[in-house]
Amino acid sequence: MNPIYLDYAASTPLKKEVLDKMLPYMTDCYGNASSIHSFGRKQNQAVDQSRRLLAKLINGSYDEIYFVSGGTEADNWALKGIAESYQEKGKHIIVSNIEHPAVLNTAKSLEDKGYEVTYLEADLNGFVPLESLEKAIRKDTILVSIMFVNNEIGTIQDIKNIGRLCREREVLFHTDAVQAFGYIPIDVKDLNIDLMSMSSHKIYGPTGIGGLYIRKGIKIKSILEGGAQERKRRAGTSHVSGIVGFSEAARLRYEALDELNQKMVDKRTYLKEQLDNNFEFKVNGHANRHPGSLNIMINAIKGDTLLMNLDLAGIAVSAGSACSSGSVNPSPVLLAIGLTKEEAKASIRMTIGDMTTYEEIDYVVEKLTEIVERLKK
């Protein structure tokens, strides 16, 4: 059996169709997209077409899409840019306690600069209660940032009502949609989203490219000093081949979204059912989750021990967020939703992807069962 990858929430392989679309802009079609000569204009045209395509997929306008290096930069820009732009109104920001480190660490850095941050507690299923948010919003609140789909347990938040509440209270709403974009239909207008982070390498596109949706009319400071790219809001030479790959990967996913998602759900369900037949475990999170996500806790067995044993068997899973790789500490997300340190350390995340086969799932179940039985003895 070839090595098996069940860590698609961390990153996905580049699809051949996407690479084929990118190759001309890595070889024959070159130049700086900001140049006015024919080489530059051709590059700029590709960027413009990609921007319009991405905007259409989320029911936004082409001039509301800004290309960045990835989800981390998008999150940083959203929080820092809004904080600086709206500090005259207030210096209070609200985030949840199960956000991606790119949001949590940025929030902490803003606290060091004199901003006040409220960290809303998620419930046992990973949901942020709407009532908690409503109570936390104040007159000086300028931004709420709550993740669309959690990267570890896959829980899907009630983004529409969160956005509606923020809109009614005249507070800007940002969502980290890195795990949602390409897996969930997104209409930024219907969902009341003001700012939204996206990433390419989660949807079978290239690494090093992502996007930030910024609704028209919103003031936001730049966090990169330099040239006048991205309509003078984000400096840096356009990563044209990456931008082209990003938009093509998004197009391919949304064109076949229902079919792709159903296949993932079917395989994830099969994986859970087969595991249920072999040993006891608890699913972390809620049934309303990312179509490929399965985070489980196996009593009395450490997740990092399972991870290493599975890796020796040629199976790649995760013991937490990819952004905390190498860490032996329990997952902050699992602790935040009420698991003990021992329970959090006994959890692993498996993520089904487009390339996952039933044969691979059978092998994973066989090996995982062997490992669990051996470690329990």
Image (tube, rainbow, N blue to C red):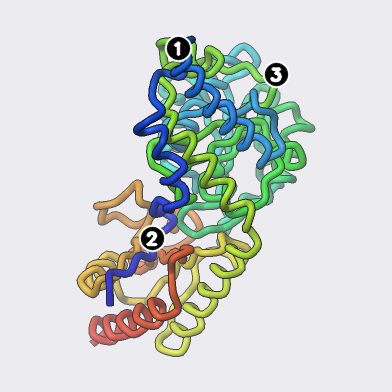
Question: Which structural element holds mark 2?
Answer: loop
Q: CA distance from mark 3 to mark 2?
A: 38 Å
First in sequence: mark 3 or mark 2? 2
Name the residue type under label 1: Ser
Q: Quadrant of residue 140?
A: top right
Residue 337 visible in the displayed image:
yes
Residue 122: x and y in percent read: 56, 52
Query: From the viewer's perspective, is 157 left or right of 348?
Result: right
Q: Is residue 82 above or below residue 274?
A: above
Q: Quadrant of the N terminus?
A: bottom left
Residue 35: mark in rendering: 1
Q: Nearer the viewer, residue 284 or 60?
A: 60
First in sequence: mark 3 or mark 1? 1
Q: Nearer the viewer, residue 377 or 340?
A: 377
Residue pictured at 53% horizontal, 12% vertical = 232
Question: Which structural element holds mark 1?
Answer: loop
Label 3 sits on residue: 217
Label 2 sits on residue: 7
Query: From the viewer's perspective, is 231 left or right of 368?
Result: right
**Marks 2 & 1, CB-CB < 8 Å contact:** no
Residue 259: x and y in percent read: 63, 65
Question: Is label 2 or label 1 in front?
Answer: 1
Q: Residue furthest right?
A: 168
Q: Quadrant of residue 23?
A: top left
Residue 141 visible in the displayed image:
no
Q: CA distance from mark 3 to mark 1?
A: 28 Å
Q: Nearer the viewer, residue 153 or 134?
A: 153
First in sequence: mark 2 or mark 1? 2
Question: Is label 3 or label 1 in front?
Answer: 1
Q: Nearer the viewer, residue 162 or 269?
A: 269
Name the residue type under label 3: Gly
Q: Quadrant of the C terminus?
A: bottom left
